[in-house]
Image: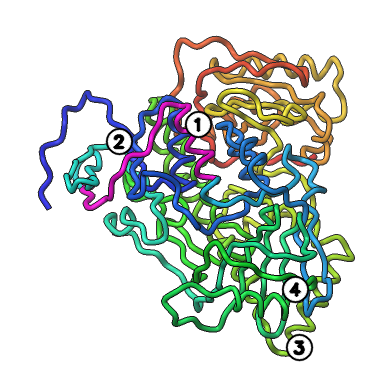
């Protein structure tokens, strides 16, 4: 394929996002909110695709969607999910109570059709001046300094778009991934699930995601509200061209559900092939992958779309900073290291959940059921299951293997972990005022006094603040309740990324702060001519928006004991 001559070097080019599902929409909206020009193309730009599969939005996604003002409309449009219940042969095994989460404005999930989710985010995209264009990617030339994409319009006309970057958010059969020459790698056998949405009359739980195990397979039930449900059943095989009929869902509901129900005429049904695949890289030069284009895995736990939303926000704040000239391009390397390892861990956990639901041997069933019951009685199911389901346990710790990303036995925060601090590009997230706010596009330094907020601490705070480079927002969070369990009783300073993950933890004294900033600052360009950092020491104080500091958001840091 021959492309025309590229445009002049001084013209500002957009970021091209291919795919307008939830992931592409969030990416485009985040970039626009940070002043980056975007073109968003999709082969079905007329509106959200009906009958799409993703149905549950978990707490971490609600936090991230709150950055662009999309969480509250989704909550209003959906049905609240307070718990995840597990049954075996119609007997209760245990539960994860999402309502017991204490470090989030959203201690619940939301069950909502994906097309509604897309409608809500499209509205926010439009509020930032964005729109979805019809187009199918047919070519991608990455041989020059910038990628050149060929997009075919509805009338058959081809348009060549030279972009600063190209992001593939175009699903499991991604054209961007194929044209960029990136392999989708994985092992394990595919598992078939029949999925359908429609009315079910009966006494089913209205606010719980229910998993029902039996020797014949697994059943998942998610309530949309108003008597409408998502049903997902494991099936050994399916060779029909049409979707599974209501009779099939009825048979497995009767066989596996602890509560009876009558399945009505389905709005839609399909066969979903649960695979375990992760792209060999999520970045190839100026081309990136996000969402299902980068990873596909089992529907167990409803983690797919939620994982893609984390991809979108992780990439957007880094890419926006690079495009604006605030960050050095090296920060973009951390997108792959952050998100690919996170995706691999979710592939592993969802595959394990899927395999547990497909056990058939008597000893396997007995061991699974006994393990879940014991974990429920001891509190371990809640302790580890709730953050896992909510995606609060995703960490960007320096890691060489999946083992390095596993949560610890204590709640103590380490470098790369999520902090309960929240950001929004416009109005603050409702309910988030109970925690410190951070800048949605820049790094923030947080100061923690520990057990004593005395005159010595005030002097330490002033000295550290004076040592922080101009343009770095600084905030004292010592007066905020609930951080002792996370940060300990010894004084600390932290660099926190725009997505709420810690980038560095170090001693709160001038030499240490300068050393920490140098250690993690190689990927950022120092900002010039900016106002001095401002310290805010009251929980109700408004965070001042300052310029991007010369700090690397995902670098190594000095860990401190409490």
SS at badge 4: loop
Q: Which residue is mark 1?
A: 521
Q: Position of residue 129 (x, y in %)?
A: 41, 26
Identify the residue under disc 3: 363
User: Can you see residue 229?
Assistant: yes
Q: How is the image coloured?
A: rainbow
Q: Which residues are magenta?
A: 117-142
Disc 3 on helix, strand or loop? helix
Residue at left offset 67%, top offset 84%: 216
**Quarter placement of the C terminus:** top right
What secondary structure is marked by label 2?
loop
Residue 137 lies in the magenta-colored region: yes
Between discs 3 and 1, the one toward the N terminus: 3
> Label 4 belongs to which residue?
257
Residue 132 percent location from the top left of the image: 37, 39
Which of the two discs, 4 and 1, labels the residue nearer the N terminus?
A: 4
Considering only order in the chain, which callout, 1 or 2, is on the residue closer to the N terminus?
Answer: 2
């Amino acid at each position: 394929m021959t492309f025309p001559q590229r445009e002049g070097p001084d013209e500002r080019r957009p970021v091209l996002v291919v795919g307008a599902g939830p992931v592409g929409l969030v990416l485009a909206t985040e970039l626009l909110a940070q002043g980056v020009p975007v073109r968003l193309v999709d082969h079905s730009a007329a509106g959200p695709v009906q009958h799409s599969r993703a149905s549950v939005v978990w707490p971490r996604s609600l936090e991230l969607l709150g950055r662009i003002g999309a969480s509250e409309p989704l909550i209003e449009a959906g049905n609240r999910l307070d718990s995840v219940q597990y049954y075996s042969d119609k007997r209760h095994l245990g539960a994860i109570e999402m309502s017991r989460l204490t470090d989030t404005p959203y201690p619940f999930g939301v069950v909502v059709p994906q097309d509604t989710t897309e409608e809500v985010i499209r509205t926010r995209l439009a509020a930032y001046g964005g729109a979805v264009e019809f187009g199918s990617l047919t070519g991608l030339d990455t041989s020059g300094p910038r990628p050149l994409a060929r997009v075919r319009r509805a009338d058959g006309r081809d348009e060549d778009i030279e972009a600063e970057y190209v992001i593939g958010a175009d699903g499991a059969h991604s054209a961007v991934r194929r044209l960029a020459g990136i392999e989708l790698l994985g092992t394990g056998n595919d598992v078939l699930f029949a999925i359908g949405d429609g009315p079910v009359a009966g006494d089913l739980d209205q606010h719980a995601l229910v998993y029902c195990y039996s020797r014949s397979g697994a059943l998942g039930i998610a309530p949309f509200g108003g008597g409408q449900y998502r049903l997902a059943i494991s099936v050994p095989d399916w060779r029909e061209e049409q979707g599974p009929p209501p009779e099939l869902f009825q048979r497995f509901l009767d066989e596996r559900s602890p509560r009876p129900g009558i399945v009505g005429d389905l709005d839609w049904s399909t066969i979903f092939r649960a695979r375990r695949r992760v792209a060999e890289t999520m970045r190839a030069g100026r081309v990136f992958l996000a969402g299902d284009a980068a990873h596909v895995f089992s529907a167990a736990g409803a983690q797919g779309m939620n994982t893609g939303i984390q991809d979108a926000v992780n990439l957007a704040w880094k890419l926006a900073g690079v495009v604006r000239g605030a960050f050095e391009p090296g920060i973009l390397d951390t997108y792959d290291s952050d998100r690919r390892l996170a995706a691999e861990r979710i592939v592993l956990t969802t595959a394990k959940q899927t395999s547990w639901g497909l056990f058939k041997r008597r000893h396997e069933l007995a061991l699974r059921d006994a393990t879940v019951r014991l974990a429920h009685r001891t509190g371990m199911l809640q302790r580890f299951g709730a953050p896992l389901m909510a995606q609060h346990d995703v960490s960007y710790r320096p890691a060489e293997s999946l083992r390095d990303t596993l949560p610890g036995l204590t709640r103590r925060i380490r470098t790369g972990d999520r902090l309960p601090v929240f950001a929004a590009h416009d109005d603050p997230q409702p309910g988030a005022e109970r925690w410190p706010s951070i800048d949605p596009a820049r790094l923030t330094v947080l100061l923690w006094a520990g057990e004593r907020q005395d005159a010595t601490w005030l002097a330490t705070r002033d000295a550290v603040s004076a040592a922080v480079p101009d343009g770095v927002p600084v905030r004292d969070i010592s007066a905020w309740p609930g951080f002792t369990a996370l940060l300990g009783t010894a004084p600390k300073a932290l660099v926190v990324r725009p997505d709420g993950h810690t980038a560095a933890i170090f001693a709160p004294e001038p030499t240490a702060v300068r050393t920490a900033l140098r250690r993690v600052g190689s990927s950022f360009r120092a900002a010039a001519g900016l106002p001095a950092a401002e310290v805010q020491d009251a929980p109700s104080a408004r965070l001042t928006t300052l310029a991007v500091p010369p700090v690397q958001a995902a670098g190594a840091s000095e860990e401190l004991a409490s």
